[in-house]
Amino acid sequence: MRGMLCAAAALAATSLAFHASLQPLSINDIATRSSTEDQADSSTNESNPDPTDFSAEELELLQRRFGVHGPQTPLAQLFTRGVDQLQPLRANTLSRLRDLKPVIQREAFRHRINPMLITAILFDEIQHSKPGEDLPFVVHSGLVETHGPAQLGISELIHQGRLPAEPTSEQISAARDLLMNPDANIELLAAKLSRLKSELGLDQGAILIASRSYVDAKAIATLAYLHNGKLDYPARILRYMQDPALHGLIYSARQPAKAYLI
């Protein structure tokens, strides 16, 4: 009799474990599992895990919840790499970011977002923007769906509750004008990243630093992926976040010239 009771208890425990394994995983659960598996692989292969390497399970969850998709085509990736080699274009992008530095720092502090993440996204979007897409008649034509330095769409204003789900034509026109305002656009980008942090279950008060831990780097890669929707985008953003010129732009300070007495 005692043996039968033990067997029944063991069977019940096995059944509970099986049903628990069928429960849907949260993004944090998947990220934790990915971190554990990657770190285990890295100890075997003596290499660091890649935070931009999303598992099939992670991609399925992100696609189901946020509607993101795959990487750019090989031709588009080649074009992107070619554009990054154009030094005059890079210099122009850095000049524009230098003008935007005060608002980047202000909104990064206000929304508790790493300023280098905001800067890296802006660098990529400005660097790869299409000529003429910021002209007023193009903006209001409806031919392009994203606008401004961060390439945000009207849908983001709806997500943030700044527009109704079905805005009028007048509201859409005003929203496009708002998105073309650089200061407002960057504030909306910081608010978007904060919103995504909340939806991913990340600590709203914590500033993510990629060099601090794999978990932070994975979170940054996920935020970048959700902003752009292309699978090859996170690697570029993490690379730009380590760019010495961008670091100097955000963290350097000009010292006033000293007057020397002769």
Image (spheres, rainbow, N blue to C red):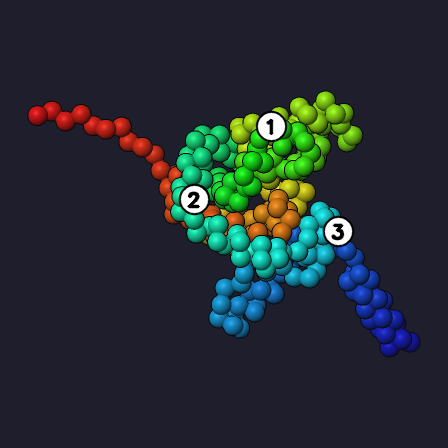
Query: Where does the image place residue 163, in percent across and percent down from the top left?
Result: 72, 28
Q: What amino acid type is highlighted by mark number 1?
A: Pro
Does the image show residue 81? yes
Observer-nearest residue: 139 or 23? 139
* Foreground tag (2 vs 3): 2
Q: Name the residue under label 1.
A: 136
Asked if the residue at tag 2 contacts the one at tag 1, i.e. Cβ–Cβ closer than 8 Å, the answer is: no
Query: Where does the image place residue 39, in percent across and percent down from the top left?
Result: 55, 64
Name the element at disc 3: helix
Give the total of numbered labels. Answer: 3
Name the element at disc 2: helix
Q: What amino acid type is highlighted by mark number 3?
A: Arg
Residue lying at 46% horizontally and 32% vertically, measured from the top left? 100
Q: Mark 2 points at which residue?
A: 90
Question: How far apart are the two marked residues, 2 and 3, measured between alpha carbons?
Answer: 36 Å
Of callouts 2 and 3, the N-terminal one: 3
Residue lying at 68% horizontally and 25% vertically, measured from the top left? 173
Quadrant in the picture for the N terminus: bottom right
Local packing at callout 2 (Cα closer than 10 Å; few below 14, some 14-19, many 20+) is: some
| Residue found at the very far left of the displayed protein | 262
